[in-house]
Each structure stands twice: as C-alpha cells, then as structure tokens.
Amino acid sequence: MKKYFSYELQHIDKNTGARAGVFHTPHGDILTPVYMPVGTQATVKGVYPRDLKDAGSQIILANTYHLYLRPGDGLVKKAGGLHKFMNWDKPILTDSGGFQVFSLTKLNKIKDEGVYFNSHIDGSKHLFTPEKVMSIEENLGADIIMQLDQCSEYGYTHAQAQEAMDKTTRWLERCLKAKTRDDQALFPIVQGNMYDDLRLESLRRAKTYAAEGIAIGGLSVGEPKQRMYEILELMRPELPESVPRYLMGVGSPDCLIEGVKRGVDMFDCVLATRIARNGTAFTSHGKKVVRNAVYAEDFTPLDENCNCYCCKNYTKAYLRHLINVNEMLASMLLSLHNITFLHKLMAGMREAIFADSLTEFAEEFYSKYGKEE
C-alpha cells in the first residue's frame, strides 16, 4: 500500500529540545516548525493565494463546519475537492468543525451519538457524528483532517472535563472506523482541559492512533498563557517523536516561540488576519495599532525589517489613512504583512534550531518585540 505521509525529524536543538523537520504530504513537503494561515471559508480573508505563496505559506486551513453549511461539501466534491475548488496546489488541513459547533451555535446538545446543533446562519437543525464529519472531510479532500472532539471550556470541573475527554476518545475510534481514504492523514486530538492527570490520560489514548500526526486541542481558550506552557511541558516527554505535533488555535508571536521551545511543530490561528482587519500589525518592535494618530505623518515603512509588498511600497501614514476611510486595501495589506511576519519568525526559528541557538534567537526577539501577557 502506498505511503502518503511521513515525518522526517532533521534536528533537535540541544538546549531547548525544539524540533526541525519535514512533513511529506501528497501536495508537497511542509518544513517545520510551521505557522498555517486560516482560510475558514476556503480563502484566507483579504489575501490573494499567489501572495500567500510569495509570503511563504506552505499549508493553509479550511473549516469543515462553515464549508458544510456553505456551499456544501457535496458541491466541493463535485468541483474536484478543495484543492481544485480554491485553486490551491499545496497542502490543506481541515478541522472537524467541532469547535465552531460549540462556540457559534447557542443551541447545541452533545450526546454520545454526536452533536445536535442549529446553524448560526438560518437556524436549521443538523447533527454532526464522527461518521458524518469523516464523510464531510473526505468530500472536502484536505490532506490533513481532524477527528470530531469535544473541546471542554476553560473553567470546567474535573468531572466535566473527564466526560468530554472520554467522549473525544470514543469519537476518535468511530472516526477511524469511518475513514476510507488513505491519502488523508487523520490527527487525533488531545483534550483534558487544565487538569494534568486528564491531559496525560488523553495523550496516552490519542498516541495509540497517532500514525501520521497528533493534535493538542483545548488550549488558548482563556487560560493564562503560563498555564498553557505548563501543560505543554507536562505532555512533552510523552508526545510521539516520529510524527508532527500540532497545537491548535495558537498564533501570537510569543506563543509560537514558547510552543516551538516546547517541541511543537505546527500552529494555526486567525489572529494575524483578524487584528489586521482592526488596523493592528505585528512588527519587529512589537504590535503597532496603525489607526492611532501618532502615525498620521509617519512616512516610514510599517516595519523596516520586512520585505513584504506592504512594507516595500507603503508608509504608516498611508495605511492609517486607508484604515480611517474604511478602504479594504488596508486590511489586505496588513493581513499580508502579518502573515509574512509570522512566516519569517518560523523560518528564523527553524534556522536557529539547526544552529542550536533557539534560546538566543528568542531572547533577541523578545528584547525588541516584548512579551505579551
């Protein structure tokens, strides 16, 4: 049987244990550590696919829940799958839609068979079972797919978190039975909320099924960042070494650095484009709120250390003008810049790992950017 996926661990930083590797997929290799831009509705908001490639994007995400509702996974299948539908020839990852079911739909009922929910668009009733989610993700045709899981909220009691973790394990087993395509890698998801014993138990269960990768869910959901780092440290010795490790929904520069230092390989987050639409940019000297009046007559680039299209061609004063008159070009330029910034950060960390100098790289970055709480 043809092997579609493999992970090659190329180097481990001798001081931090951070990993550099390459994940081989049907639509190309992914150099890790990697940040993955989020294209919820089969597009990264405000950024041309050609510009994503120029910026260094190796893989993008799409969302099962949203694409199931609109335009429908059946239509995407008729179009030849997501790669053809959205004209993206590099790897794609789809999540299970479970997080959106829990966060976007006020009316949902979680049962053993699955999740009953009402569409946030028109209120129509739907049921996501592990089998249904596998069918949707197979129709979408992404390279990497996620199991249906229950992401327990920050603040859950131990008993509530254990119930969600147990359900996640049962749903994983059903997902594996329902999966039919060998050219898609199914990542199991570790849950367990903020409880050490549940995290380790969930990881122990998930590892059994982590043939091609493993995902860490239920973090960056409102807990202090330090607690997230503690949980990553807790799990680190038990994480499988021969597959990529994916920390879901994390993408601020400091969290990327701290995650990589703790052995994580893959990250995704909507933060880069979301803050761009609000007029905020990552820069080598920290975040800049470009709509602020201090930039009204600032005719310098957004970041002198960046060579993206935005920074090579436009000034802070012009960007501020675009923001204040609600021109869509503002969010397009800032989104492209923020994505480029994060790709450059990941590439810098990868280079530092090979040189066993990630600690020094992080210290230098923080000395200019600062640390976020």
Image (cartoon, rainbow, N blue to C red):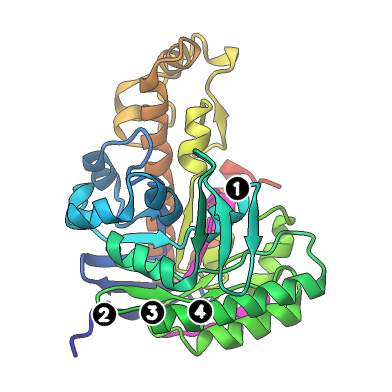
Q: Specify start and end residues of the magenta stretch as a single range.
A: 234-256
Answer with left or right where residue 296 lies relative to residue 64.
Answer: right
Residue 283 in view (yes/no):
no
The residue tagged 1 is 105
Q: Position of residue 297 (x, y in %)?
A: 49, 9
Whichever of labels 3 and 4 marks the residue nearer the N terminus, that label is: 4
**Disc 2 vs disc 3: which is toward the camera?**
3
CB-based contact (under 8 Å), mark 1 and mark 2: no
Separation of marks 1 and 3 at Cα, in angstroms? 25 Å
- Could you tell me if the residues under marks 4 and 1 are in contact, i.e. CB atoms within 8 Å? no
Residue nearer the viewer, 208 or 265: 208
- Spatial CA span between label 1 and label 2: 32 Å
First in sequence, mark 1 or 3: give its number.
Answer: 1
Q: Residue at x 25, y 42 (%)?
A: 49
Compared with 191, 312 (above or below) is above
Badge 3, how many Cα within 10 Å: few under 14, some, many 20+? some
Disc 4, disc 2: CB below 8 Å? Answer: no
Q: Nearer the viewer, mark 4 or mark 1?
A: 1
Q: Which residue is mark 4?
A: 172
Q: Which residue is mark 2?
A: 182
Name the front one of labels 3 and 4. Answer: 3
- Residue at image point 21% right, 65% down: 27
Query: Residue 324 shows which numbered tag?
Result: none
N-term mark: 4 or 2: 4
Which residue is tagged 3? 178
Residue 318 position within the rendered picture, expressed as x and y whole percent measured from the top left: 41, 14
Mark 2 packing: few (<14 Cα in 10 Å), some, or many (20+)? few
Callout 2, which amino acid? Asp
Above or below 160: residue 71: above
